[in-house]
Image (tube, helix red, strand yellow):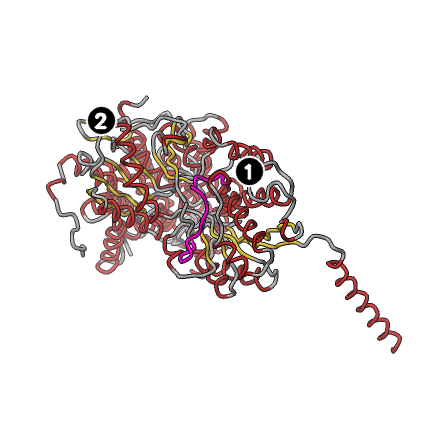
Amino acid sequence: MILPPVIQKRTSMFTTEIILQTLISGLLMGCVYALVAVGLCLIWGLMEIVNFAHGQFMMLAMFMTFWMYTLLGVDPLFSLPLGAVLLFLIGIATYFFIIKGILYTTFLAQIFATFGLGVFLHSMAQFLWTANYRSIQNPLIAGRIAAGKIFIGFPHLAAAVMCVIGFIFLYWFINKTEIGLALQAASEDREAASLMGINSNRIFAMGWGIGSACVGVAGVLLSNFFYIFPEVGFTFALIAYVAVALGGFGSIPGSFIAGVFIGLVEALGGLFIDPAFKYFSVYVLYLAVVFIRPQGLWGRY
Amino acid sequence: MRTGKILLVLFLAMGLCAMLGTPANAQPKEIVIGGIWPLTGPSAPTGVECVQGAKLAMEIINGKFDLNLPLARTEGLPRLGGAKVKILFADHQNIPDKAMGEAERLITQEKVSSLMGCYISAVTAPASQAAERRKIPFLDADAIAPTLIKRGFKYFFRVTQDDEIWFRDFMWTRFIPDIIRKKGGKVQNVAVLHENTLWGVDAARYGSEYAKKHGFNVVTQIAYPARSTSLISEVQKLKMVEKQTDMLLQASYTADGILFMKTFHEMDYNPPLIFNDGGYREPAFLEALGKKSDYILQRDEFSVDMGERKLLVKQVNDLYKKRFGVDLNTNSARNFMGVIILADAINRAGSTDPEAIRLALLATKIPPEQSICSWEGIEFDPNSGQNIKAVSLMLQVHDGRWRLVWPFDIAVKELVYPLPKWSERK
């Protein structure tokens, strides 16, 4: 990895607490990135379509959380299952109404279809809910835990834990259940799977549903500590694309590890080099992987 | 065939007569001013505020109001036979090209006497360039980039204060010494935190440059991308010098500001003073943060609190609230004054000749009593076109509202300094 000259002169100020704090906070944030990335990865692995509306799906989940909280007083903790179900349905609807028709067309058409969907969702959000920034004022999960001089935001911790649980559940689902195995079969060879009697339409829809539900869960958890507005999904989706490419297209554990790793690189890179270059570190890492191992760290292509 | 031709000529002649006839009927003329603001796109909410401020000023000029403002007590512009002011609004959508095109259109097709706008500095630059080329006066009441007045333009006038003037003449020599005199404590070491586009970089540059010139130390200067998904490393960098830091000078926008305050709280970062250079004007900032936004300082050029000492501010704010349902804020107030200043100059010029308006603007001398903004009057520097009397106020968040805390003689709330630590807050 190429590093620019270290600007910070007084290195003695990097106390153990500062480094440990950055490490922990970066790790927790990385878990959220990871869950966003896993959803994207699942869809890609299944049918080799990049969902460019992935970030907007997350935004929808965040707005749903916000409105549930503001209008009905439902805490994000309780709207979590609702977010998962809603995004699951949105994913399935997206498959049947948009993706199904372009499954066998050119790559370009597939890009434009999901990209267009993203633009539509983003504009719709701005039209319906304005471009204003929102925030969940007093969620149930709030405050911070202090361990000596190290502080851990409770919402961050909760989000990270739930993301890990979500991932474990997904991993179990994919590897141990019949539908999961069918998903794997379909992603390995569409034709062969359908010859074996697997209804590929149903399986694909399922993949879109589960992938979107992942990002929905991440969005709801993020609402506890991040601001909400129509463009919120862009930056998170960008990180997810990098994570998927880094971890290896189609490798679910790969993209999860890559997501966590990006969280760490972002925080530590910002600390040791310069915050203005924190995404630079992430993209340099990504470029290095693309050059040395184009299929990604755990990729199968 | 021939009859048809004759009829056509007659018809056209009649039309021509009708057209010529209208102005001859001694109705007061209209003075047209062009206003270019972001009415759609990401800055639309602010653009709407600018337009509303301008509209109210137009109504006050054209009607009769008992207010201590130029042109309020008469109908229209007296020296132009009571001519009414009309503002043509155009939308630049935050796009520099669009602003330039709209400026050209307003000048050549709508024949405007002068132009106003455009809130976004990067958009104001090309629009005022078009005006300069066509020799039409351009009044800037809301775009603050220091570079705008450094172009040597003859037709560009700015009423609002910019970052360079603020840091050179106020922040370090008037505001900080005032606090120390009143509250005790010490401000010596400054941490600078800024977003890394034009505004943030400029603000940080002038902020730290003049801090050093006035004998302060800059202990750290951190640039960050405004659209960050997390601000962990930035806050940790600040924490590395937390013990030495006497104040945090911040140039942040609303969204990153929200995330910063949340991260400050979560990571227990407690600088004794937080000053933001004016990016938190959107109501969304306070709404999103609630109590967490308490005691941040921000410079501003208008506050409804000024109405407690100044009748004019209260009167105009009441009119505005009745008309638009909200209080005035800095953006509406500055543009309200902008239209008044421009109309006053046109009235004194006694014509719509751009050169006459330019000379009248240069001769502008409006006392502070006749202004609703914080300025110590309105007088333009003949070289740069900058209002040399522009002064800012200091506002601080108290219970989720921006309150006027400095200058002390007009303050409505006692300035809280040093800021209570997060662990000491309820």
Q: Secondary structure at mark 1?
A: loop
When asked about the image quadrant of residue B410, the answer is top left
Q: Is residue B74 above or below residue A288?
A: above
- How would you rate the neighbour count of disc 1 (Cα within 10 Å): few for under 14, some for 14-19, many for 20 or more? some
What chain is tagged by disc 2? A
Q: Which mark is residue A128?
A: none
Note whether residue B174 is visible. Answer: yes
Q: Which residues are magenta?
A: B371-385
Give the residue pinned by disc 2: A146
Position of residue A145 measured from the top left corner of the image (x, y, whole percent): 25, 26
Position of residue B255 measured from the top left corner of the image (x, y, whole percent): 38, 41
Tell me how many marks there are: 2
- How would you rate the neighbour count of disc 2 (Cα within 10 Å): few for under 14, some for 14-19, many for 20 or more? some
Position of residue B228 measured from the top left corner of the image (x, y, whole percent): 33, 45
When asked about the image quadrant of residue B34, the answer is bottom right
What chain is tagged by disc 1? B
Q: Which mark is residue B68?
A: 1
Q: Is residue B57 above or below residue B28?
A: above
In the rendered view, does A174 fall on the left or right side of B209?
A: right
The type of residue carrying mark 1 is: Asn
In the rendered view, does B219 fall on the left or right side of A222?
A: left
In the rendered view, does A3 fall on the left or right side of A166?
A: left
Note whether residue A250 is visible. Answer: no
Tell me how far mark 2 sits from mark 1, CA to CA.
57 Å
